[in-house]
Image (cartoon, rainbow, N blue to C red):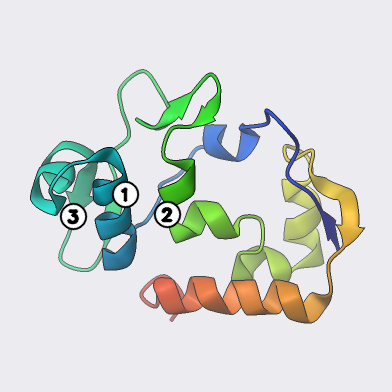
């Protein structure tokens, strides 16, 4: 597998779907933007009994996606940080190839050892066990 995030690219952020959060993601993002966890959650998070995700704004893909990229890049959620090494992509050559259709970084850069990709996929499973039962 080859992958290298391309400068200025935000295609992964522009895909339809949700950004799920762990409690650690919530705390890290709130601290980064200088808000209390409760205030950040009220403004940016939708929580159900089982999951927590970023709210999707009406006219944008993400509250934190700006022209220059991710506004919370140093504190971005694990789901964003780990992309494209999600379990469902690492374990499926077909899904990996499909993702390459919108992600220009797939197939670029240095060769990624499969064990490294699998370790990141496992981190995603650990961060979001309810998504990967």
**Element under label 3?**
strand
| Residue 77: mark | 2
Residue 72 at x, y percent in the picture = 41, 40
Q: Residues within 10 Å of mark 3 (few under 14, many from 20)?
A: some
Q: Nearer the viewer, mark 3 or mark 1?
A: 1
Q: How many marks?
A: 3
Q: Is residue 89 left or right of residue 18?
A: right
**Element under label 1?**
helix
C-alpha gap between disc 2 and disc 3: 15 Å
Give the mark, 2 or 3, whose residue is nearer the N terminus.
3
Q: Nearer the viewer, mark 2 or mark 1?
A: 1
Give the position of the N terminus as an image quadrant: bottom right
Circle 2/circle 1 CB separation < 8 Å: yes
Give the mark, 2 or 1, whose residue is nearer the N terminus.
1
Q: Is residue 66 left or right of residue 122?
A: left
* Res. 81 in view: yes
Q: Who is closer to the viewer here, 32 or 82?
A: 32
Is 125 located above or below residue 108 in the figure? below
> Residue at point 46% right, 44% down?
17
Choose top left, top right, bottom left or bottom right for residue 60.
top left
Residue 31 at x, y percent in the picture = 25, 50
Q: Which residue is labeled 1 in the image?
A: 29
Q: Is residue 131 left or right of residue 107?
A: left
Residue 12 at x, y percent in the picture = 60, 40
> Residue at point 61% right, 73% down?
121
Give the position of the C terminus as an image quadrant: bottom left
> Residue at point 26% right, 66% down?
23
Give the mark, 3 or 1, whose residue is nearer the N terminus.
1
Q: Nearer the viewer, mark 2 or mark 3?
A: 2
Q: Which residue is labeled 3 in the image?
A: 47
* Res. 76 in view: no
């Amino acid at each position: 597998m080859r992958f290298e995030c391309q400068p200025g690219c935000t295609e992964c952020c522009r895909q339809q779907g949700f950004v799920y959060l762990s409690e650690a993601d919530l705390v890290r993002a709130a601290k980064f933007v200088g808000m209390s966890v409760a205030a950040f959650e009220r403004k940016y998070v939708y929580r159900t009994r089982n999951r927590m995700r970023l709210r999707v704004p009406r006219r944008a893909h993400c509250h934190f996606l700006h022209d220059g990229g991710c506004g919370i890049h140093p504190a971005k959620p694990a789901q964003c940080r780990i992309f494209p090494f999600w379990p469902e992509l690492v374990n499926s050559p077909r899904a990996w190839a499909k993702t390459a259709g919108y992600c220009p970084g797939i197939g670029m850069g240095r060769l990624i050892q499969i064990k490294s990709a699998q370790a990141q996929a496992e981190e995603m499973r650990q961060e979001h066990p309810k998504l990967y039962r």
